Amino acid sequence: MHTTFIHTPAPLQQKNKDPRAGTAILLALGIIAVVSIVCGYLGFTASQQMRMMQITRDMIKAKMIAETGLNIAYNRIKSNFKAAPSTALDSTFSEGRFVVVSEAVPSNEQRYKLKSTGYCGLGRHTVSADIENRVITPAEDDDDRFFALDYNLLVGGALSMTGNFYAGVGAIHANGAVTMNGSSSVNSTTISSASSITLKKTTNISAIPDQPQVSIQPETLSEAIAALKDYAQQHGAIYASGADIPANPPGGIAWCTGSDTGWSGVGTGCFIFDGAFSTKHLTLQSVDGYPALIVTGANALTLNAGTTINGALILPSSSLKVNGHTTIYGAIVIGQNVTGNGTADLYAGSAPGFNLPPQAESTDNVVITAWY
């Protein structure tokens, strides 16, 4: 007998679920989320900090650039205050640029406001400064302006006067012979010469012949003439031709680098000629004690009748001839011979010399009165 066995599978056993496993997963996910949030926040914070650092850096550099532009503008104006109205700068510098403008202060032409704006990346900064020009004019002693001469009438060659000549001068010296004939009259304390002296009238005159020669144009006189020319240049009173010379030159001094051709010979001021000088009928009135006429050339000069010169006459290289009635009020320096006839009158005064232009020029002193 065959027996059949039926195999019945055993029932599957169910695994027990651990509730802690789900909690761990949730906890891990939470931790990951928190870490992600913290990392994101830290990244955002770091990014913001970097941006703030960049802005701060740019602002600091912009401020430095602005101050640099302001200093550049100030130094330009400090050396030349006249440049203040036109000062406007726009220039690159370092990693940025600056823009500077100047603004006038109403009712005060000696004050300006400078405003400089610096740019660098994200930064922008503006600085300003108030500047003032405090003009300084040093006090000057009047004695420093007077150029003293040792003689009222100084002649480099012979002095020969005839006719009804009159000389009311303090001291006369000639490096050549002195001869005064006719009705010549001299009211002088001394007449000296490096040669001989012949006088028709010797009343109250101390005649001193055979003296050492005197330099007609020492370095000091050359410097004095140069100072007068410089003053003319400062006032724009340099002329190439006598025809261009005004009767009243600006500053009181006219310097002609050419000849006197076209010059009227009439004027108020000091007239200096480097070129040829022709025979003239002059009517000159000096100003501020300056010489009336200076001729540096070596050509002979003849003064015609009716000439009147109020001021020193300086001809350091020329000879002088006086015709007819000529009157000169002031010291006289002649480099060569002096001759004359007729009724020439010389009134050189008791204090030989002439005034020089003021040397104490006003200077700019540009200072910063406020910085903000």
Image: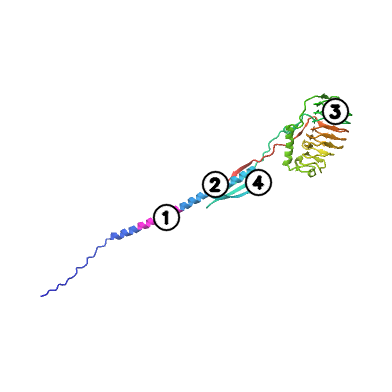
Please state the horizontal and vertical placement of residue 325, each as a whole percent of the image: 87, 35
Mark 3 or mark 4, whichever is nearer to me = 3
Amino acid type at image mark 2: Met
Q: Is residue 159 left or right of residue 84?
A: right
Amino acid type at image mark 3: Thr
Disc 4 from disc 2: Cα separation: 24 Å
Q: Which mark is residue 64?
A: 2
Give the mark nearer the N terminus: 3 vs 4. Answer: 4
Does the magenta-highlighted stretch encompass residue 68?
A: no
**What is the crowding at mark 2: few (fewer than 14 residues within 10 Å), some, or many (at least 20)?**
many
Residue at image mark 1:
41
Name the foreground residue: 157 vs 202: 157
Disc 1 from disc 2: Cα separation: 34 Å
Q: Secondary structure at mark 3?
A: strand
Q: Looking at the image, which residue is at 39% across and 56% down?
A: 36
Which stretch appears magenta?
30-47
Q: Looking at the image, which residue is at 74% across and 36% down?
A: 225
Mark 3 or mark 1, whichever is nearer to me = 3
Disc 3 from disc 1: Cα separation: 116 Å
Q: Which mark is residue 179?
A: 3
Residue at image mark 4:
83
Q: Quadrant of residue 263?
A: top right
Disc 4 from disc 1: Cα separation: 56 Å
Give the mark nearer the N terminus: 3 vs 2. Answer: 2
